[in-house]
Image (cartoon, grey):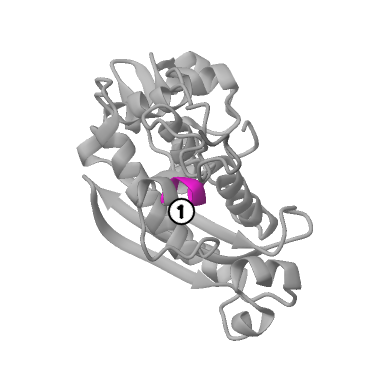
Amino acid sequence: MPNKYFPLDTKSIHQLATRGLPMENLKAQIDESLDLFLELARACGVNIIKKQGYYYFNTKYIRLEDAEFCIVDIETNGSKLDKHQIIEIAALKVKNGVIIDSFESLVYAKEINPHITEITGISTEDTKNAPKLQEVLDSFKLFLNDAIFVAHDVKFDYNFISGSMQKLGMGPLFNRALCSLALAERTIVSYRYGLSYLNEFLHLNPTARHHRAMSDVQTTYKLFMLALQNCQEKLNNVEDLIKFSKEAPRLKRPKIDPLLPEEIGEEKE
């Protein structure tokens, strides 16, 4: 952002999430009619509403217990969007702490590097009968709708999915996003914050299979719930939570990894 679908500058986006954006500022940045812009934004996953002459993301007025969070994870056959693709995607939709829906699919891939297969367990053979990326992303976008997009280190998953959609001629994602890693850093004391480490340290998902999409989503869900439980800040709405995850002080990490065995070779008395 900004782009042809959502041409607003960073300051205006911040105002939509906080004190509100005046109509004249909004209209000055869009080429199409206001109604068409709001419709296009809604189609890309974000609702903008008018309150007392100002425009806001509707998440500014959605309480946490009423919000739908979509916890997402993808596996890819490489990290570069211009060269690689999604090979698996999974998501859980959560409302008031309860899982209300799920989405999971492998994605057809012509080639998967043996190194990726070693990490994920997903081979080219596994995907030969899977639906193609366009079909999977069409279905995923319908599933996501306007829910808050949650992922561990959310920038990678969000940008890879949104970029993949644009490569296929679809609109990008503009759903409000929340990083479970950033939230954990502010609510859970840990030596490290990688998902695998947190799972081992906190015993979140005893059947976890790291680097498989649904398994990582289930682990992230447990982490997300624990982070919300630990949060002592008064949060009135979704935007308060997003702001907290970005701006609250990070907790101090312990100096010694509690998962490491005691040092061998200590002096004996």
Helix, strand or loop at label 1? It is strand
Residue closer to the observer: 42 or 136: 136
Residue closer to the observer: 15 or 117: 117
**Pointer 1: residues within 10 angstroms few (<14), some, or many (20+)?**
many
Q: Is residue 193 magenta?
A: no
User: Which quadrant would the N terminus be assigned to in this image?
Assistant: top right
Q: Which x, y percent locates residue 29?
A: 59, 23
What residue is rendered at 47% in x and 30% in y?
Answer: 34
Q: Is residue 197 magenta?
A: yes
Instruction: Report if residue 145 is visible in the image.
Output: no
Q: Which x, y percent locates residue 123?
A: 65, 78
Considering every residue shown, the one lying at the far front of the view is 269
Q: Is residue 185 left or right of residue 130?
A: left
Q: Is residue 142 above or below residue 112?
A: above
Q: Which x, y percent locates residue 19?
A: 38, 13
What residue is rendered at 68% in x and 75% in y?
Answer: 109
Instruction: Report if residue 86 is visible in the image.
Output: yes
| Kind of residue at badge 1 | Val
What residue is rendered at 53% in x and 46% in y?
Answer: 173
| Residue segment shown in magenta | 195-199
Q: Is residue 143 above or below residue 54?
A: below
Q: Is residue 148 left or right of residue 225?
A: right
Q: Which x, y percent locates residue 238?
A: 32, 31
What residue is rendered at 50% in x and 39% in y?
Answer: 193
Instruction: Determine the main secondary structure of the stretch shown in magenta.
Output: helix
Q: Is residue 170 above or below residue 184?
A: below
* Residue that carries the numbered disc 1 in the rendered image: 72
Residue closer to the observer: 175 or 198: 198
